[in-house]
Image: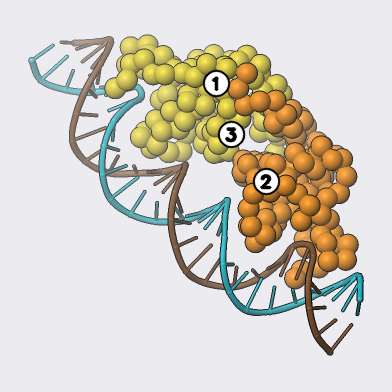
Chain colours: A yellow, B orange, C cyan, D brown
DNA sequence: CACATAGTACGATCACCATCGAACTTCGAC
DNA sequence: GTCGAAGTTCGATGGTGATCGTACTATGTG
């Protein structure tokens, strides 16, 4: 188990990678939940509809895209939304997505 | 050849579908070019790196997501960015993407 | 120590999608 | 009508990624 996983620097953020991460509904749900909570959340405390191993996969994709930061607290792995850094790299992107997710798909 | 293809109404716009459309770099390039031009562009006048049949596929995905409107002008098929409608359904989304695409991937 | 908890690593599977070429259609020009 | 230009349609193919179960590792607790 990698106890200190690599996180990309803001200067390395890549739009394609970020969109690839955000296009998956499970991953977008993770981001939405983090944004709504406004605080760190452990991997296991998310409301997800996939298995643990699949969840691990999704968290890795989000981390490698730069959307979340992960650090251990005991056996739990805490997840932080890298909001400010994302906003700096891609202004308005997360805002638009969070806002779009909050309202019904059809109006 | 379908001469009057179906376009979704704004009330039917779906975030997942829109993101699925925008995550592909070729399709995003089409949207960016339409936004930059500010006017309708024929399918064949885009700067794309794929074959004609693949391009047709991409235009269809964009149309079915509601991102573009298509109509014939002679043998040419003109494409219009549905900017205002997208902005109404998903405020800030296109702005953020166009803006992100304008600057280099890394800074 | 033994045990439970939290998550990772690894392979395998499966579905989807971007891509293409070839054949076809539609329209305008000659 | 004949030709070319502009797109579409139709398979086929190939790669990628989401998913899972199982085995494993690390940490905390008794």
User: Residue A84, relative to residue B14: is it above or below?
Assistant: above
Quickly name the residue at label 1: A12
The reply to whether callout 3 and callout 1 are in contact (CB within 8 Å) is no
Residue A28 as seen in the image, left or right of residue B80: left
In percent of width and height, residue B10 lies at: 80, 46
Say what secondary structure mark 3 lies in: helix
Residue B69 visible here? no
Q: Out of D20 and B51, give the one closest to the viewer.
A: B51
> How far apart, in angstroms, are the residues tagged by discs 3 and 1?
12 Å
Residue found at x 77% / y 30%: B95
> How far apart, in angstroms, are the residues tagged by discs 3 and 2?
12 Å
Say what secondary structure mark 1 lies in: helix
User: Residue A27, relative to residue C22: is it above or below?
Assistant: above
In percent of width and height, residue A34 lies at: 55, 21
Quickly name the residue at label 2: B27
Residue B36 visible here? yes
Q: Residues within 10 Å of mark 2 (few under 14, many from 20)?
A: many
Say what secondary structure mark 2 lies in: helix
Quickly name the residue at label 3: A16
Residue found at x 43% / y 38%: A50
User: Residue B12, relative to residue A12: is it above or below?
Assistant: below
Residue A7 as seen in the image, left or right of residue B58: left
Q: Quadrant of the N terminus of chain A?
A: top left
**Chain to which mark 2 belongs:** B
> How far apart, in angstroms, are the residues tagged by discs 2 and 1?
23 Å
In percent of width and height, residue A65 lies at: 52, 26
Residue B93 as seen in the image, left or right of residue A71: right
The reply to whether callout 2 and callout 1 are in contact (CB within 8 Å) is no
**Chain to which mark 3 belongs:** A
In percent of width and height, residue A24 lies at: 54, 39
Residue found at x 83% / y 50%: B41
């Amino acid at each position: 188990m990698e106890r200190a996983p690599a996180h990309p620097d803001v200067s390395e953020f890549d739009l394609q990678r970020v969109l690839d991460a955000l296009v998956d509904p499970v991953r977008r749900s993770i981001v939405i939940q983090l944004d709504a909570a406004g605080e760190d959340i452990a991997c296991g405390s998310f409301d997800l509809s996939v298995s643990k191993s699949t969840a691990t996969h999704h968290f890795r994709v989000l981390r490698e895209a730069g959307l979340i930061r992960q650090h251990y607290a005991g056996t739990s792995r805490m997840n932080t939304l890298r909001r400010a850094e994302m906003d700096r790299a891609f202004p308005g992107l997360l805002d638009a997505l969070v806002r779009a997710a909050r309202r019904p798909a059809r109006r």
